[in-house]
Image: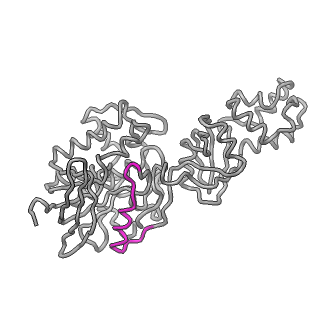
Amino acid sequence: MNQENKYDVVILGGGAGGLFCAFHAAKNGNKVLVLEKSNKVGKKILMSGGGRCNFTNRLVNPHNFLSKNKHFCKSALSRYTPQDFIDLVEFHNIKYEERKHGQLFCVDSAKDIVNMLIKECKNANVKIITDALPSNVIFNKNLYTLNAEINNKIDSYKLKICTNALVVATGALSVPTLGGSGYGYDLAKQFNLEVVDLHAGLVPFMFTDHLKPICKKLSGVSHPVSITCNGMTFTEDMLFTHRGLSGPAILQISNYWSLGDTISINLFPAIDIESHILISKKSTPKQRFKTILTSDISKAIADELEILFWPDMANIPIGEWSNSQIKSVCINLKAWKVKPSSTEGYRTAEVTKCGINTKHISSKTMEVHGQKGLYFIGEVLDVTGHLGGYNFQWAWASAYAAACDL
């Protein structure tokens, strides 16, 4: 075999975790190769956070992550913290800002994060090959051998590569147009690793019942809500779309929803809406119920709520309503029960929920138990973060844990 095709570390995937692991492993003296199947690295980073990349969160805590083993993420997260990544961002003079809930975004562009990772890789002499499809991974005599088919606009050729360590940072099934795939899971199964049931995570809901035309009519309208499902509650903005419901509140709760579940939406999380209406009944008895609501909710939403919850009382002044009638409507406004028919799926999902069962993986090094030199990092594992920079922090932390062992 050509000596140039022998590497100490080969990393499959040129996303956040792959690039981050690459330059840290190279700084440890390793000859490192990154194989990326897309035509450029960091595509998902570029699209994240509305093009500004929510690269971490100041308030990272293990309970911000879902996993069959809730303790698995603790070691890596403690070894590489949000402040560690902030220090790297500041070293590269990248301007960033803090938004609500501790979320950190680039001021200018997500390109700043991608360029930072590429620069670090270049400085550490990491070799990156794009348009590369790896296949036929074989483990023999402590070496991993694989083929890579390179197809780009300029050239097409095949490489046979061998390495002492193989790091799988292929991401998962979410947003296939940005390079998401199930290759990491296929490789895990090749080495007899269990993959926990996969679902689209941090994803909008769709409806097929009476709510579908309402959502379509209100498409583009957002409103702060408190939303609950299976004992979890998030207070964030909810966005109506022409297919259903989205926005931060919906994306967060989608990680806790299963097909058939009902979600409960409090449309007035900041006020006691019943007391507010009863006070208005005394002070402005000639007002209509809907008119009172529009001080705290858009008229468009109020119009639809009226049709849903009090159509027969629409034109009756609030002063003529009984207190029990007011209470009945307010119960619906504080706990609006809706039942999604499905999610939008991997096409728009920000992450893939679940993944490779972490019982097979060392929480300290990300190496597979009993399989020397094979590592899995990032989204491909059964670790799913909340919305708000947590999944990027998991990518950095798990990549760093693996790199320290290489």
* Scheme by which the image is coloured: one colour
Residue appearing at x 21%, y 69% in the figure = 144
In this rendering, would 169 be left or right of 28? right
Residue appearing at x 39%, y 54% in the figure = 180
Q: Is residue 64 magenta?
A: no
Q: Position of residue 146 (x, y in %)?
A: 23, 66
Which corner quadrant holds the C terminus?
Answer: bottom left
Q: Nearer the viewer, residue 153 or 14?
A: 153
Q: Nearer the viewer, residue 238 or 281?
A: 238
Direction left: furthest residue: 3
Residue appearing at x 17%, y 66% in the figure = 162
In this rendering, would 299 be left or right of 194? right
Q: Position of residue 202 (x, y in %)?
A: 51, 50
Vertical placement of residue 149 versus 223, above or below: below
Vertical placement of residue 316 versus 195, above or below: above
Quarter of the rendering containing residue 332: top right
Q: Which residues are magenta?
A: 177-195
Vertical placement of residue 206 versus 330, above or below: below
Quarter of the rendering containing residue 216: top right
Q: How many marks?
A: 0
Q: Position of residue 100 (x, y in %)?
A: 49, 36
Quarter of the rendering containing residue 30: bottom left
Which corner quadrant holds the N terminus?
Answer: bottom left
Q: Position of residue 80 (x, y in %)?
A: 31, 50
Q: Is residue 190 magenta?
A: yes
Q: Nearer the viewer, residue 189 or 194?
A: 189
